[in-house]
Image: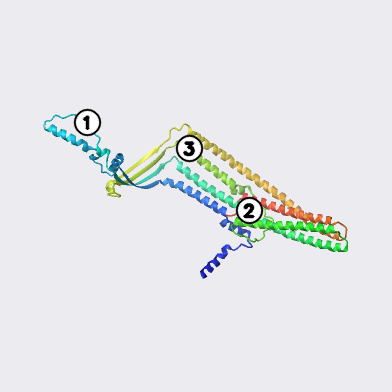
């Protein structure tokens, strides 16, 4: 029982909810716990192993083969005996040949004229055609190594290593995307909680106005419809307040999904993200899409060299050493054998296929070269567009902030004038609606600006180290 309690106590921190989480802490958790990043890490490791496997082919291949066979097939049995170095003339059927031949020789020695011996050639010896079943145990060590491949293995090695580097860039790009989502969620939560605070103030102001209308109604200065209009507006604001809380809960659920950790609360961030500095040099050096395009160009170049290797010969060496007998490992060295050799293979004609593949690789290289130029110009244009949009939104935010400040003052003014009987309750609620409209526009503009900022950070590869 005590051991169980101890285990539970030690496990509590693992299941505890995260509260007051800061953005830097969230990025650290994201690096280690995000499931998509873990999958990308496994993919990168597999690409690395593939590259190492290609390099390993340069060292050749050694195989140990142990075979245990039993057969009464004439060809197999005769071959088994040859491999075991045990073949004799009897295995050729000389028994059926020597008996008649010996009799003929003996007869000739006795003065008997020799008869026609050509019929001996038609004899089918039983020892050769119907041998008894034989066991065969063979142990063989073989080694094959490429000596020259026309550059194939070299180019394969370079390409596979670059594909591994490409997987690292893909992982980095995914990390930037997850950092983008995490930052945006942090700022979204801060904005929606600011929205909730402002809605509380608006609801409180409407409740105050409701009390004023009720007091004036008792004195006969307000109509029952005035109270209904205020209460309807209060219900509308309350509905918006409840929806905002649900949106905040969804944002926390999404943040918990990203971090693979239950997040209950965060430390608020500034509602407007800082504008990143942009330079052409930093963009060209850091942008992952440009890096991937340039790496793809190098891969296309090596692929072209790989296709050119079709015109060159391939040379390989091989060696075998082994022993065979009808008993396992019996007199191994006495019946051993070796084979060594070198082989060259050179394709001299392929019907024009090689030329077509080389030309295809060359065209792909030229295509990739244009894609790199397109990526550079496209990314630069996108950065300029984002910066222009952010500057435009900055102006909107300043305008909405000013309009919101004055809308609040106008609402307070109309509220006072309503109490003095100078305006209707509808006029007051219209001004209150204007305040809410400006609040929504201001928060929407801030959210839109933050989205552009984080997109720009992602393009500039400023998510941090992964």
Disc 1, SS: helix
Structural crowding at the residue carrying mark 2, measured as other residues with C-alpha within 10 Å and reported as few (<14), some (14–19) or many (≥20) = some
Disc 3, SS: helix
**Residue corresponding to mark 2:** 181
Structural crowding at the residue carrying mark 1, measured as other residues with C-alpha within 10 Å and reported as few (<14), some (14–19) or many (≥20) = few
How far across and how far down the image is residue 152, in percent?
46, 41
Task: Tell me how far mark 2 sits from mark 3, CA to CA.
Answer: 45 Å
Quadrant of the snapshot with the C terminus: bottom right
User: Would residue 424 be found to the left or right of residue 269 on screen?
Assistant: right
Q: Vertical placement of 199 versus 165: above or below?
A: below
Task: Tell me how far mark 1 sits from mark 2, CA to CA.
Answer: 96 Å
Task: Tell me how far mark 1 sits from mark 3, CA to CA.
Answer: 64 Å
How far across and how far down the image is residue 348, in percent?
43, 33
* Picture quadrant where residue 213 is located: bottom right
How far across and how far down the image is residue 200, in percent?
74, 60
Residue beneath the point at 41% across and 47% down: 59
User: Would residue 282 be found to the left or right of residue 400 on screen?
Assistant: left
**Residue corresponding to mark 1:** 119
Q: Looking at the image, is mark 2 or mark 3 earlier in the sequence? A: 2
Q: Nearer the viewer, mark 1 or mark 2?
A: 1
Outermost residue on the left side: it is: 110
Disc 2, SS: helix
**Residue corresponding to mark 3:** 308
Residue beneath the point at 52% across and 70% down: 2
Residue 371 can be seen, yes or no: yes
Outermost residue on the bottom side: it is: 2
Q: Vertical placement of 18 versus 297: above or below?
A: below
């Amino acid at each position: 029982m005590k051991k169980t309690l101890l285990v539970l106590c030690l496990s509590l921190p693992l299941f505890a909810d995260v509260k007051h989480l800061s953005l830097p802490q969230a990025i650290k958790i994201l690096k280690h716990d995000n499931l998509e990043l873990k999958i990308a890490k496994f993919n990168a490791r597999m690409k690395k192993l593939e590259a190492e496997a290609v390099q390993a082919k340069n060292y050749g291949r050694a195989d140990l083969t142990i075979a245990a066979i039993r057969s009464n097939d004439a060809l197999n049995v005769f071959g088994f005996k040859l491999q075991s170095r045990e073949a004799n003339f009897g295995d050729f059927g000389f028994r059926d040949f020597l008996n008649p031949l010996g009799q003929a020789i003996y007869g000739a020695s006795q003065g008997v004229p020799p008869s026609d011996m050509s019929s001996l050639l038609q004899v089918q010896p039983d020892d050769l055609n119907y041998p008894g079943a034989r066991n065969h145990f063979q142990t063989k060590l073989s080694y094959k190594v490429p000596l020259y491949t026309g550059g194939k293995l070299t180019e394969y090695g370079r390409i596979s290593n670059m594909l591994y580097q490409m997987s690292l860039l893909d992982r980095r790009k995914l990390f930037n995307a997850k950092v983008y989502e995490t930052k945006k969620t942090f700022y979204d939560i801060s904005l929606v909680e600011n929205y909730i605070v402002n809605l509380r103030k608006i609801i409180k102001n409407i409740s105050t106005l409701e009390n004023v209308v009720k007091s004036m109604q008792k004195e006969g200065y307000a109509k029952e419809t005035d109270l209904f209009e205020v209460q309807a507006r209060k219900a509308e604001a309350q509905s918006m307040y409840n929806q905002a809380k649900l949106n905040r809960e969804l944002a926390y659920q999404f943040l918990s999904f990203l971090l693979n950790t239950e997040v209950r609360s965060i430390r608020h961030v500034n509602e407007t993200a800082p504008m990143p500095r942009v330079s052409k040099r930093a963009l060209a050096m850091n942008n992952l899409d440009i890096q991937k395009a340039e790496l793809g160009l190098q891969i296309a170049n090596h692929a072209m060299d790989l296709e050119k290797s079709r015109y060159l010969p391939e040379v390989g060496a091989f060696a075998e050493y082994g022993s065979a007998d009808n008993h396992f490992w019996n007199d191994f060295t006495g019946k051993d054998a070796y084979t060594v050799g070198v082989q060259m293979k050179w394709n001299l004609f392929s019907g024009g296929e090689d030329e077509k593949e080389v030309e295809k690789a060359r065209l792909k290289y030229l295509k990739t070269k244009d894609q790199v130029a397109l990526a550079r110009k496209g990314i630069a244009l996108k950065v300029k567009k984002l910066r222009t949009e952010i500057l435009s939104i900055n102006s909107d935010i300043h305008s909405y902030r000013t309009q919101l400040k004055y809308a609040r003052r106008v609402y307070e003014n109309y509220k006072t004038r309503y109490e003095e009987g100078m305006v209707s309750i509808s006029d007051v609620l219209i001004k209150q609606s204007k305040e809410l409209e400006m609040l929504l526009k201001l928060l929407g503009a801030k959210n839109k600006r933050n989205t552009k900022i984080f997109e720009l950070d992602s393009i500039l590869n400023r998510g941090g180290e992964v």
